[in-house]
Amino acid sequence: MGQSHERIDGRLRAFIEEQPVFFTATAPLAADGTVNLSPKGLRGSFAVLDAHTVAYLDYAGSNAETVAHLRENGRITLMWCAFTGPPNIVRVHGRGEPVFRDDPRFPGLLARFPDADGAPHGLRAVIVVTAEHIRDTCGYAVPFMTYDEDRSLHRSRFERETDETLNAYFQRKPDIPTSLDGLPGLPLPLPPLPSAPPAAP
């Protein structure tokens, strides 16, 4: 039923790149800490960097649990499931790192997302995940559902923000500078958003 893989390539890579939504799961080290599970969408915000590394754009939201957990311990699981076509579930278990706006690597990573414009979505970081275990399973119980289009609400909410007003918004949200369990979350003040270099041809 399940199969482990050494690399993210071929059929596996094609499958995860085709999915319009995926999920991330993280947790603090504390036994009584809050486990976090988040859906991620918006076309162009996910990229396979190489056969063992994936990344996604961390957009503005009302908390920063994933960022906080990764800063503390790095553990993360990403999951994709087929809502159309043959049943399939793919999980990537690995170590994640939030790369923030003021990191020298940030512009280069941003160039790996040529179809995404992070500025209108309040881009906070690029989450880079190194796979330690890659596995797919049947997905027989996942229902058929159709993808119509991305919602426009996230863009319309955040595209009117400047770096200054976005920083003020993050400062007002108690669960962005720190997690629900009090771990360090998104570092503030928010640095200016750098421009991405041109993507390699």
Image: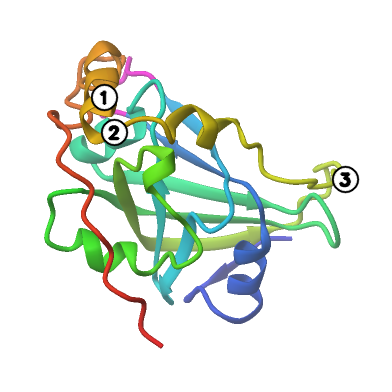
Q: Residue 29 magenta-drawn?
A: yes
Label 3, label 1: how far apart the Cα atoms are: 41 Å
Between residue 53 and residue 196, name the one nearer to us. 196
Q: Main secondary structure of the magenta part?
A: loop
SS state under label 2: loop
The residue carrying pointer 2 sits among few (fewer than 14), some (14 to 19) or many (20 or more) residues within 10 Å by Cα, namely some
Q: Residue at x 29, y 64 (%)?
A: 109
Q: Residue at x 21, y 55 (%)?
A: 194
Between residue 49 and residue 119, name the one nearer to us. 119
Judging by the rendered image, the residue that carries numbered circle 1 is 165
The residue carrying pointer 3 sits among few (fewer than 14), some (14 to 19) or many (20 or more) residues within 10 Å by Cα, namely few
Q: Quadrant of residue 178?
A: top left
Judging by the rendered image, the residue that carries numbered circle 2 is 162
Give how far across and how far down residue 185 sits, in percent: 22, 28
* Residue segment shown in magenta: 28-34
Q: Which mark is residue 144?
A: 3
